[in-house]
Image: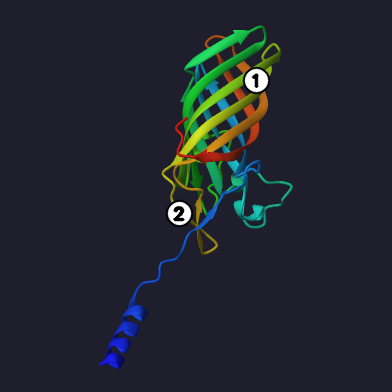
Amino acid sequence: MKKAAFVILAIFLLASPVFAQETEVGLAPAGFNAFELVGRIEQQGFTAVGFGYLNYIRGLPTDQLFAPGTSPLLRGEADARFTFYGTGTSASRSVYENIFAANLPLELTIYYSETPAGASFDNPDSFKSGTPIATFTMRMETILNVQEPNVGVLMAFGESIQSNTAPFTLNSTIYTLGHDNLNHRFSLFGQGFRQVEEPVQAFYIVGGNAMITGSGIQP
């Protein structure tokens, strides 16, 4: 009887589906970058649209973030597997001399395409191609230091919480970029160029990173 029960159990175990385990990337200890990015921000009045791509994710070889064969010295948006797109509108602004400080709530989503979709900074919507794999609800502080007419240096810092984390498959391995409820601190640095004075129209070229700061705290 015991032998029959053992045989039945063995058959059941063999017939049970085996679920692939997800590997979590983008996890970093305090003081280390979870991921890094390059992008562009376009401003119309008090509304901003940010888009770009990730060029580093902790836990993934950097060459896997781009199309096979991409030169490590010539990586760009067209070859990127991980892109982002976000929007926000300023809630407040303070001006002192040539310093413009603003706060804006925004939502940013990261997208994944195993075969890069050929994103272009000339087409902001092209950065929304692919599968959404993480969303960040954020409060961002921006500081613009105007250096000369129509040119300024931008620094920005964001406090965020992550949601809508979804798995993605890269080279037959299933991953997730972090997980829901993670808090990140985003830091951006770049240069801005005003194109129209009133209403303001400008664009900013930026690079930056995100660090994990905790979990479960709303910005």
What is the quadrant of the N terminus in the image?
A: bottom left
Question: Label 2 sits on what residue type?
Answer: Pro
Q: Give the quarter of the image for residue 132.
A: top left
Question: Label 1 sits on what residue type?
Answer: Phe
| Residue at image mark 1 | 193
Q: Secondary structure at mark 1?
A: strand
Q: Give the quarter of the image for residue 10.
A: bottom left
* In-image side of 17 versus 143 (left or right): left
Determine crowd level at label 2: few under 14, some 14-19, many 20+ residues with C-alpha closer than 10 A: some
Q: Residue 151 location, x and y as percent?
A: 69, 17
- Farthest-out residue, top: 97
What's the residue at 49%, 45% (across, down)?
111
What's the residue at 55%, 17% (across, down)?
102
- Farthest-out residue, front: 2
Q: Residue 48 location, x and y as percent?
A: 51, 24
| Residue at image mark 2 | 167
Q: Are marks 1 and 2 in contact (CB under 8 Å)?
A: no
- Farthest-out residue, left: 1
The nearer-to-camera label among 1 and 2 is: 2
What's the residue at 50%, 22% (across, down)?
104
Front position in the image: 171 or 61: 61
Q: Is residue 66 visible?
A: no
Front position in the image: 85 or 69: 85
Front position in the image: 134 or 34: 34
Q: Residue 59 location, x and y as percent?
A: 61, 54
Q: Residue 127 location, x and y as percent?
A: 52, 40
Front position in the image: 125 or 56: 56
Q: Is residue 175 placed above or below 214 in the rendered structure?
A: below
Determine crowd level at label 1: few under 14, some 14-19, many 20+ residues with C-alpha closer than 10 A: some
Q: Is residue 57 visible?
A: yes
